[in-house]
Image (tube, grey):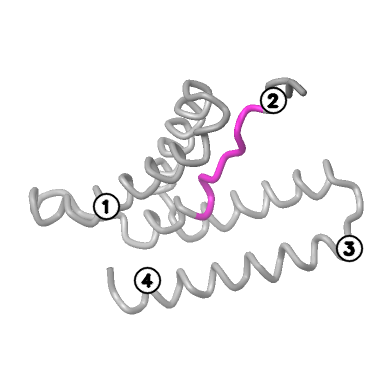
Amino acid sequence: MSFRDDVVYLGLLLLSILFGHLSRQVVSERPLRRTASTFCGLAVLGFVAGRHAAYCAACYLLQVAVLMAVPWRSAHLASLVLQFAYLLFFRVAPQVMPSMTSPGVTSNLASISCRSSPPTSRPTRRI
């Protein structure tokens, strides 16, 4: 990854933090804020990644599948391990297979955009 990609990634991180702060200030309804954040995230992903957005879509689907398959208590750990394995794969793959190029900032965008939440059905707590 080049210096330019690092700058773009850092800028996107800072903008996402700023957007999150502003959206909490402006929009009080949670479903509306979630929908607006989703569309803004997809717009940024499409603008920055272009055709490489398919990497993020595949990562998202893989995250959802893993989160649905693992127990609730270990979902966060499974998500973390899977995401770092994905990033490691795209860092090492060009050295192992020179014909495979890393998608650049897109693999970093995956770590921002593919943080899917665990399933909403929580187990009941026994007291």
Label for residue 5? 4
Tell me the kind of residue under disc 1. Leu
Query: Which quadrant holds residue 49?
Result: bottom left
Contact, mark 4 vs mark 1 (Cβ under 8 Å): no
At 10% across and 50% down in the image, what residue appears?
Answer: 99
Pointer 1 residue: 88
Distance between mark 2 and mark 3 Cα atoms? 30 Å
Query: Which numbered disc, 2 or 3, marks the residue closer to the eye?
Result: 2
| Label 1 Cα crowd, 10 Å radius (few <14 / some 14-19 / many 20+) | few
Tell me the kind of residue under disc 2. Arg
Q: Earlier in the sequence, mark 1 or mark 3?
A: 3
Percent from the top left, x then y, of residue 87? 32, 52
Label for residue 26? 3
Q: Is residue 47 above or below residue 21?
A: above
Read off the magenta span. 112-119
Q: How many marks?
A: 4
Label for residue 122? 2
Query: Which numbered disc, 2 or 1, marks the residue closer to the eye?
Result: 2
At 83% across and 60% down in the image, what residue appears?
Answer: 24
Q: Earlier in the sequence, mark 4 or mark 3?
A: 4
Q: Label 4: state its secondary structure.
A: helix
Report the side of 4 relative to 113 (left or right).
left
At 47% across and 60% down in the image, what residue appears?
Answer: 48
Q: Is residue 125 magenta?
A: no
